Each structure stands twice: as structure tokens, then as C-alpha cells.
Image (cartoon, rainbow, N blue to C red):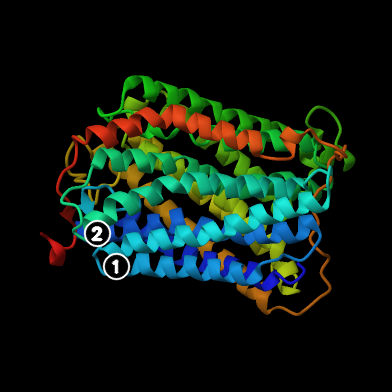
Amino acid sequence: MQGSSRLVLAHFWAAFATFAVAIPLGAWQMLVRSPLHQWIPPELYYRAVTAHGTTFAYVFPTLVAMGFGYAVCSVSLGRPMRGLPLAWVSFLLVMAGAAMALAPVAAGNANVLYTFYPPLLGSSYYYLGVLLAVIGSWIWIGLMVWHFRRWKIDNPGLPVPLAMFATTVGALLWGWTSLGVSAEIAFLILPNAYGWTPTVDPGLARLLFSWTLHAIVYFWLIPTYISFYVLLPQAAGGRLYSDKMGRIAFLQLLIFSMPIGLHHLFVDPQIGAGFKFLHAVFTGMVAVPTLLTIFTICASLEIAGRLRGGRGPFGWIAALPWDRPFVLATGLSLLMLGLGGASGLINMSYVLNSTVHNTQWVTGHFHLIYGGSIVIMYFAIAYELWPRLTGRPLAAPKLVRLQLWTWSVGMVIVTLPWHLVGVMGQPRRMAYYDFTNSALASQGIWVSVSAIGGFVLVFSAALFIGVLLASHRGPAAAISPLKFSLAVNPPRRLPKSLNSFGIWALLVLALTVANYGYPLAQFVFLNKSAVPAFPVSQNDRR
């Protein structure tokens, strides 16, 4: 990858190292809350939840997006990446921030969950670590935007390659949405943690976090969608159905991802009903780029299937090369995306949300979307890149397919029972449940099934790490360079609106001001909900 292979490989190894630690923590949490295990001190449970959530929210997907972004930048633009020293600085800042944040969690001094939940107050080092990791990722954003602009200057009038266009969308989205959590830490939590302010405003904190809370999911999703558009058609033996439809889908993700966070605050009395409804409408709009992507990818797969001899209305499906890891992973990802998206329709509904709010239904939904449809494509991306990064072929193809199947099956076993007990009213983020109580007894079997599914995921994760290690140590071989899929009709010229971001950035700004401006001003100027903090560390109570 023209000098950036070591950089990309470092990001992926670091990402999957944190993944390997966080996955067993998740399985352990499910076990200790089930009838299969005796109760444990709640402090230990919340320590594990905080470490698991922090890793999977701020560290693991950020490293994957950064590493994949560097690979896309080098391959799609066809020239060596510039600014490698800055890229390494960015990587080190993210890793240092992760270590700084997770150390106090491990010590039991920051059991506030990755959502922080003021007025709970953990160690200041936890918040500084999260902030440092986010700031480190901003260097990556700058590098992606710089390479995008530099290529356009050097190639006036030509379409920016779709992969780089989409990567820049992801960078811009992360830059904008990360401002919420950064502002919460910098202006609310840290001043209180250092004693500069006597109180903290939980309402304003939740509002700022909602700025980040849902849009961050689409930042996690962008690498998955990029792989659908630029890696899958070629892996299946066909071509991308439409380059332009891909650009439209990514632009819609950029526009509609931001003004939707208040659907997480439907029950908060401090937010007006009108703004909650407005965010619910825009949350529904996010389904549009997803449906557009599903259509485009299915059309691309049909092209590949028919080129392979598929006949009849559905014969092309059977003709697809399902033995290829990328094709198999995509099929499983789309199935989980469909299930998770269906449950998300309940969450986004202003009326129906009240039936499942803060229950295990919510946990099942976002694990099926993120842990299922997104993470399985992270695996597929790694399998696709690994031979090009190491100069060694991918080891054990049968184990690769087994790993993808066990991850998908394990995630379904974990999440479908969560949806069920959520409808039965089981609250999430509880350290234990008394299943001897007749009101909860019927939920016990489903919680146990979910816990078993967690260990299926641990097994799958171990297979994944094992395949990567075996591939890394295998014999060197001649590996074909990474190439991205061509469209059926590659664009030679594009309207400015599909090849730049100026007008769309202004639209994102306008929508954010319209959807967040008044609620933010209300909290800032009225300032009626501030309360003293509640330190979670016994050594720091004041």
C-alpha cells in the first residue's frame, strides 16, 4: 500500500487486541447476571460494563476506521500517503488515551459507563483519556480531508474515487459528532472533577452526549458500507451497480445522522415534545440511505450472480460464491442489519419507544446492529487486507468461514432473547436479577440462553485472532494488490454536489442549529438543573 502498510497493520492489530480483551468481559457480564451464576458485588459488574463499553465505543471502531481509511487513501488515490509522521502521532495519542481511560476503570475509580451519566463522577484520568483518544482521531480527520482536497486540486474536474469520497464522509461525520462528547467532558465534567465548579448539569450533559450518541453509530457503520460498495462486488465476481447511488447514500448518512440524538431522550422532561418529535422524524430519514445501500448492493450481487450463470428470478443468489469470506460475511451482515433495523423502528417511534425504553430490548437492538452487522464486516475487511499487509496468504479458509458463522449465530443467540425479555420489561444495566421472584422467573431461561450465546462469541473471537496470527506467521507468497470494484458505468464527470462537501456541510450545520440550538440555549441560559456531583470512588467522595 505504497509505504503505509505498517501503519494500517498497526491500527488493525491494536484494534483487535482491544477487541480480544473486551469480548470476554461482555460474556462474563451476561453470565454473572444469569441464573447460571451466583450474584457478585455490583461494583465489579459496572467496572466490566464501563471497560467493555468504553473500548467498543471510543477505541476499537476508531482504530478500525482510521486504519481502513489509510488503506483506502493509499489504494484509491493511487499514490503514497503524505503525513505519515502525523498519522503515527494520531495512533499513539489514541492508544495513550485508551490506556489512560481504562486504567482507572480497572482500578474501580471510574464505574460511570461509557455514557458517563453525570452527576456520577469518576476519576479525571478516565475523562482525560477519552478526550485524548478523540483528539488523536482528529488528526486522522485532518489527514483524510487534506488528501481529499489535494487529489481534487491535482485532478481538476475528475470524480474523487468513491472509496475516498466515502472515507471523507466518515471523517467529517466523526469530526462533527465527536464535538458533543468532547464539549461535555471539557466544559462540564472536568471542571467539576477538578473542583473549579461546585455542580454539574446532568440535563445539559445528556443533551451534549445525545449529540454524539447516535451519530457515532454511523461513524462505526461507514467502514462497513464502504466495504459493501468497493470490496464486495469484486469479491463476488461482478461490478458495482451504481457509483452515483453510493455517493448519494453516504451524503444522506452525513446529513441525517446528526440531528437525531434526542430520540434517546424521549422520557427526559427537560426536552420539549416538539424537538423530540423533530428528532424522531429525522431518525426515520436515516433508513433512506440504508435502504438505498441495500438496493445497490443487492443489484451488484445480482450482476455477479448472473455473470456466474444464475438463471431465473432468484437463481443468481445460489450462483454467488458463498465460500468466499467477504461474500459470506456480507450475507450474514445484511441479515443481522435487517433484524436490528426492524427493532430500531420501535426505538425511534415517539409512541412505541415508551414500551421498551431502558429495557434489554435496547441492548439487543444496538448489539445486533453494531456487534452483528458492523463488526462482522470489520472481520471481512481484515481478511481482505491481511494478505496485502503481510505478504502472506490467509490461513485456514474453512476456519474463516466457521468463524463468520459462529459470530453470526452467537450474536443472534445473544440478542434475540434480549429483545424478548425487554418486551417482558427487564431493565438493562442491572448488576443482578432475583429470578426466584415469580415476576422474573420466566425471564431466567432466556437470560441463560443469551449468556451461552456470549461464549459462542468468545469462541468465534478466539478463532478470528487465531486465523490472523496463523496468517501473519505463514509462508510468504506473491499476493495480488488490493483493488476496488468498478461501477457498471464508471462516472467520468460528476456534478459538484456529488464530488465535494461544501453545500452539504452548510446543510449539516443548519440542521444541527435548528434541531439542537434552542434546547442547548435553554440549558445554558436557564441553568436550573445543576446538582452536586456524586463520586463513584470511595477514596474521592466529597
Q: Where is residue 364 in the image (x, y as percent from the top left)?
A: 42, 41
Q: Along the horizontal axis of the image, is 365 left or right of 123?
A: right
Looking at the picture, which amino acid does disc 1 mark?
Pro
Asked whether the beta carbons under mark 1 and mark 2 sit within 8 Å of each other, the answer is yes
Residue at image point 54% right, 53% down:
407
Residue at image point 22% right, 54% down:
192
Residue at image point 26% right, 29% down:
270
Residue at image point 71% right, 51% down:
149
Q: Is mark 1 on a helix, strand or loop?
A: helix
Q: Counting other residues with Cα less than 10 Å from the Cα at mark 1, is it few (<14), some (14-19), or many (20 or more)?
A: many
Q: Mark 2 points at which residue?
A: 122
Q: In front here: 415 or 441?
A: 415
The N terminus sits in image quarter? bottom right
Q: Name the residue under label 1.
A: 104
Up-down relation of residue 373 to residue 28 (above or below): above
Q: In front here: 402 or 241?
A: 241
Q: Position of residue 272 (x, y in %)?
A: 31, 23
Q: In front here: 542 or 349?
A: 542
Query: To which quarter of the image does residue 446 belong?
Result: top left
Looking at the picture, which amino acid does disc 2 mark?
Gly
Q: In front here: 152 or 2?
A: 152
Residue 263 appears in the picture as rendered: no
User: Sequence order check: which comes first, mark 1 or mark 2?
Assistant: 1
Residue 504 appears in the picture as rendered: yes
